[in-house]
């Protein structure tokens, strides 16, 4: 009898705690379904709609997909976006590494704290504003060309070029990547680095023999973030890259503008989403793979 | 004269305001097993790290075979260190860890592999060669760390409390592995530890450090039987330290008067102290005797029993003297069982005059 009572009490306690847990989880579930999964499903559905007389109608046709994926300009744009985001990621990771290395290994605790704070400050200002400030620097009569003209060089065209786009991407990603890399490096057990020296490893060689393998997870996550932010960015390729040829985000805007082609824009968006899913997934797999061969 | 393998010449190491090592002088000969022992923060690990080139001395010189090593970077020294955390590379397997040092020395892949496997075999862990470090047990990791350091055939091996994370049984096993290795290889081991039992069990010579200074250097027996000062006597433990003022003194013996009574102690190598100076002497707990009747001759202190600590065949009794000071005596369990201490109101702790060890004022 008493056993039965205690079982009932236990199960009701379990039920209570599961209700309790659910209450905590509910807000995030509602938020995610309303603002992420819902719109995502709608976007996928929309890519099968049709547009008649500049009005979108519900339907289920493959026409948008065949039209977009059959066009060379779509694939040109796809390759361009990949290339620019890829180059941006490589350059950002390389530029960020010496800074992160210095902050993680050479700087004192206080310097590191201040540096992280300074790296957060750029995010106080709108990204768009920061991009416009590059006009002053990169323009043909801008700061850099003025400086170079003293040396008898230039002027170089930097605005409305791929170079400009990458500079824009880096404005967005560099501070974040330095912060992520610094955390990845700062977590490395110092005795492993010392053990490498102790066994005869020269300091520079230690970077790729010990530090890079140890920081692999954090560094790959930083690169994935960098790529995702660049790949989906509209502002830099539009204002600094001159939008011609268009990257995928610009293509989305152009497609919507020309004849209210929301469904075709949705096709581009879905392709981008799938690409980023694959990149993020591959990145996470590589980051958490147990051993390097 | 052949220069010693290692020599520290008035070495000082400062970290900002903190002095970790203060004017340390000592030498280590080739083939010795030296333990550097002391409480945490005494500078023993810093001393070892200066030998490995992982810290630079602030003052003084560290020499190896007569050569000043101060400016030789860590990666150009053959002074492999076994870390307390072992510091094995988790992204390499056991064999690759062992190969690391050989690879840095430009040994060809096949030769590298052969020598690594040979060492893993010697450490009796050949079957784990291709295993991840994370999948090895504490004792196996220990053996990988030793193999990784020894495969480069150094003349000296540095060990920084490598056994402190292992359980008691494994510590004993690894101690015999280490002593056997050291004897077979004939190379120098410098072993940093806070554990007296580890140091005494393995080392030929023990360096005891306290607050950056060397408190005593000597064989385990010297340190145990003839502590040079109060710090060593207390650190070694199981010693009764009795303090008083110098009364009558001759060239050989001295009378020390204190709250526990008046005792005559051999001076040993010490110089004759001045009358009225503070002086101390040590009676090792295992050299003291107890009785329920007052001994007719010799030095004795009347005490009462506070508690006893029973560890197998040996029992330590904790006694309180009339002035409140605590004294210890260590004896065989079978000796103790013959006595009836529970009934006795007073217990006399006594010792033969030549078994007290004079340590002077400090």
Image (cartoon, grey):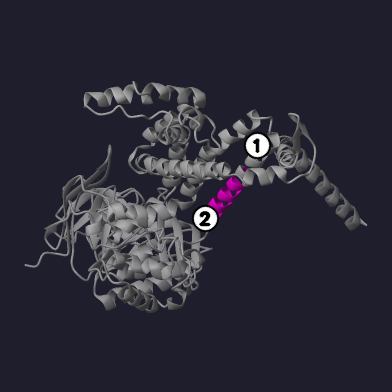
Give the magenta-colored segment's residue range.
A273-288
State the residue at coordinates (20%, 56%): B254
Using a 10 Å C-alpha cutoff, classify the residue at mark 1 as few (fewer than 14 neighbours), some (14 to 19) or many (20 or more): many
Gap between marks 2 and 1, in whole Å?
31 Å
Whether residue B229 is visible, yes or no, is: no
Q: Quadrant of residue B232?
A: bottom left
Name the mark on residue A265: 1
For this view, does B60 lie left or right of residue B177? left
Q: Is residue B272 above or below residue B201?
A: above
In this rendering, the answer to whether B59 lies above or below B126 is: above
**Residue under the point 63% across and 40% down:** A269
Answer above or below: position of A16 versus B114. above
x%, y% of residue B190? 27, 63
Residue at image x 29%, y 73%? B182
In the image, residue A274 lies in the stretch drawn in magenta: yes
In the image, A10: left or right of A79? Answer: right
The chain letter for the residue carrying disc 1 is A
Q: Whole-percent x and y of residue B207? A: 26, 59
* Label 2 chain ID: A
Residue at position x 58%, y 45% in the image: A276
Foreground: A206 or B212? Answer: A206
Q: Nearer the viewer, residue B282 or A286?
A: A286
Q: Tag 2: Cα neighbours inside 10 Å, few (<14), some, or many (≥20)? A: some
Residue B350: percent from left, percent from top:
35, 63
Which quadrant of the view contains residue A114? top left
From the image, tell me which residue sits under label 2.
Answer: A286
């Amino acid at each position: 009898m008493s056993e039965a009572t205690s079982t009932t009490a236990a199960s009701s306690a379990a039920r209570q705690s599961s209700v309790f847990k659910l209450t905590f989880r509910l807000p995030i579930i509602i938020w995610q379904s309303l603002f992420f999964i819902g719109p995502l499903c709608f976007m996928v559905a929309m890519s099968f709609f049709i547009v008649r007389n500049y009005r979108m109608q519900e339907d289920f046709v493959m026409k948008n997909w065949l039209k977009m994926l059959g066009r060379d300009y779509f694939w040109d744009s796809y390759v361009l976006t990949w290339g620019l985001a890829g180059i941006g990621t490589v350059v950002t990771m390389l530029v960020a590494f010496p800074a992160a290395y210095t902050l993680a290994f050479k700087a004192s605790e206080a310097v590191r704290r201040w540096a992280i704070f300074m790296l957060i400050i750029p995010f106080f200002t709108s990204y768009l504003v920061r991009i416009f400030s590059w006009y002053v620097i990169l323009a043909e009569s801008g700061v850099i060309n003025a400086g170079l003209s003293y040396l008898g060089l230039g002027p170089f065209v930097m605005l409305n070029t791929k170079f400009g786009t990458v500079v824009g991407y880096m404005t967005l990603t560099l501070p974040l990547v330095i912060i992520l890399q610094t955390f990845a490096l700062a977590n490395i057990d110092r005795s492993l680095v010392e053990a490498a020296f102790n066994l005869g490893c020269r300091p520079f060689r230690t970077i790729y023999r010990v530090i890079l393998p140890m920081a692999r997870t954090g560094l790959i996550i930083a690169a994935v973030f960098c790529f995702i932010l660049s790949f989906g960015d509209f502002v830099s390729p539009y204002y600094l890259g001159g939008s011609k040829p268009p990257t995928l985000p610009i293509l989305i805007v152009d497609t919507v503008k020309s004849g209210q082609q929301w469904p075709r824009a949705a096709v581009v968006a879905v392709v981008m989403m799938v690409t980023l899913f694959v990149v993020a997934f591959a990145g996470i797999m590589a980051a958490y793979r147990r051993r390097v061969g | 004269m052949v220069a010693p393998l290692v020599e520290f010449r008035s070495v000082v190491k400062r970290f900002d305001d903190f002095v970790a090592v203060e004017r340390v002088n000592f030498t280590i000969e080739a083939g010795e097993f030296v333990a550097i022992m002391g409480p945490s923060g005494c500078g023993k690990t810093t001393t070892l790290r200066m030998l490995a080139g992982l810290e630079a001395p602030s003052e003084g010189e560290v020499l190896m075979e007569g050569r000043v090593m101060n400016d030789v970077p860590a990666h150009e020294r053959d002074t492999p260190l076994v870390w307390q955390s072992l510091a094995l590379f988790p992204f390499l397997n056991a064999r690759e860890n062992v190969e690391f040092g050989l690879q840095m020395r430009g040994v060809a892949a096949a030769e590298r592999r052969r020598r690594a496997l040979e060492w893993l075999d010697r450490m009796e862990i050949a079957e784990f060669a291709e295993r991840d470090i994370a999948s090895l047990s504490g004792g196996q990791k220990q053996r990988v760390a030793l193999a990784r350091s020894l495969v480069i055939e150094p003349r000296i091996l540095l060990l920084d409390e490598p056994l402190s994370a292992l359980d008691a049984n494994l510590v004993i096993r690894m101690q015999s592995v280490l002593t056997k290795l050291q004897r077979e290889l004939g190379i120098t081991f410098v072993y940093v530890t806070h554990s007296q039992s580890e140091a005494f069990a393995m080392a030929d010579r023990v360096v005891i450090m306290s607050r950056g200074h060397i408190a005593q250097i000597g064989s385990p027996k010297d340190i145990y039987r003839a502590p040079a000062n109060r710090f060593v006597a207390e650190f070694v433990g199981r010693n009764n330290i009795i303090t008083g003022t110098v009364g009558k003194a001759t060239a050989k013996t001295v009378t020390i008067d204190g709250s526990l009574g008046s005792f005559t102690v051999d001076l040993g190598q010490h110089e004759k102290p001045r009358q009225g100076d503070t002086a101390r002497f040590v009676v090792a707990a295992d050299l003291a005797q107890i009785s329920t009747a007052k001994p007719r001759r010799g030095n004795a202190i009347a005490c009462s029993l506070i508690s006893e600590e029973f560890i197998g065949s040996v029992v330590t009794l904790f006694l309180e003297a009339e002035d409140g000071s605590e004294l210890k005596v260590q004896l065989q369990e079978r000796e103790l069982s013959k006595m009836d201490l529970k009934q006795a109101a007073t217990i006399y702790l006594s010792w033969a005059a030549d078994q007290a060890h004079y340590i002077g004022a400090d």
